[in-house]
Image: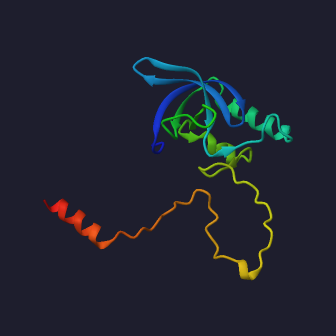
Amino acid sequence: MGYGPGYHYRATIVSVYDGDTCRADIELGFGVVLKNKTIRLANIDTAEMRGENKQDAHAARDRLTELIQGKEVVLQTIKDRTGKYGRIIGTIYLGGQSVNEMLVSEGLAEKMSSGGKKKKREAKPKKSKSASKPKEDDKKDADVAVKIQIPDDILRSVAESSEE
């Protein structure tokens, strides 16, 4: 059974902080172990322990603890570097199943896009029709392409120099 792309490590979960954050000892191979590293579960979000919805936060934390505390898991990292707060971002697999997806399917976590949480949009003031512009793509993570015009004489000189 494959786990998908990315780097995969054996890890032992040493503690659970909340529904989407835990600490683990990660085996890198050749006897090298990263001890007590913070892992942020990728592409999911659970209620915050210090937020308004503490009951949901405790339920998510308790379920994650039940699933992985003290167990050997497979950690699939998303990037080869840490996230914004110095945490390793990854998916945890237990018995070949994604723990991240389990929490979503059990209603304890919300799925996020790889770019992060979707923020609530504020109402924009209405513009007059004369000042309206064509609508742009609202996606924050959209690829941006820039079209530039290169003069023909420059294109010819580049083509000629590459033929030499």
Q: Is residue 9 left or right of residue 65?
A: left
Q: What kind of colouring is applied to the model shown?
A: rainbow
Q: Position of residue 138 (x, y in %)?
A: 64, 64
The residue nearer to you, when weighing 164 against 124, is: 164
Q: Position of residue 96 (x, y in %)?
A: 53, 39
Q: Residue at x 68, y 43 (%)?
A: 103
Q: Is residue 105 left or right of residue 2?
A: right
Q: Position of residue 133 (x, y in %)?
A: 66, 76
Q: Residue at x 48, y 30 (%)?
A: 9
Q: Residue at x 66, y 29 (%)?
A: 22
Q: Position of residue 61 (x, y in %)?
A: 74, 33
Instruction: Check the image and name the residue furthest to the bottom.
Output: 130
Instruction: Check the image and name the residue furthest to the top.
Output: 31
Count the marks.
Answer: 0
The quadrant in which residue 159 appears is bottom left
Q: Quadrant of the N terminus?
A: top left
Q: Is residue 106 above or below residue 71?
A: below
Q: Quadrant of the C terminus?
A: bottom left
The residue nearer to you, when weighing 4 against 128, is: 128
Q: Is residue 40 above or below residue 110?
A: above
Q: Residue at x 86, y 41 (%)?
A: 52
The residue nearer to you, when weighing 4 against 112, is: 112
Q: Is residue 150 above or below residue 63?
A: below
The residue nearer to you, when weighing 131 against 76, is: 131
Q: Is residue 123 left or right of residue 86?
A: right
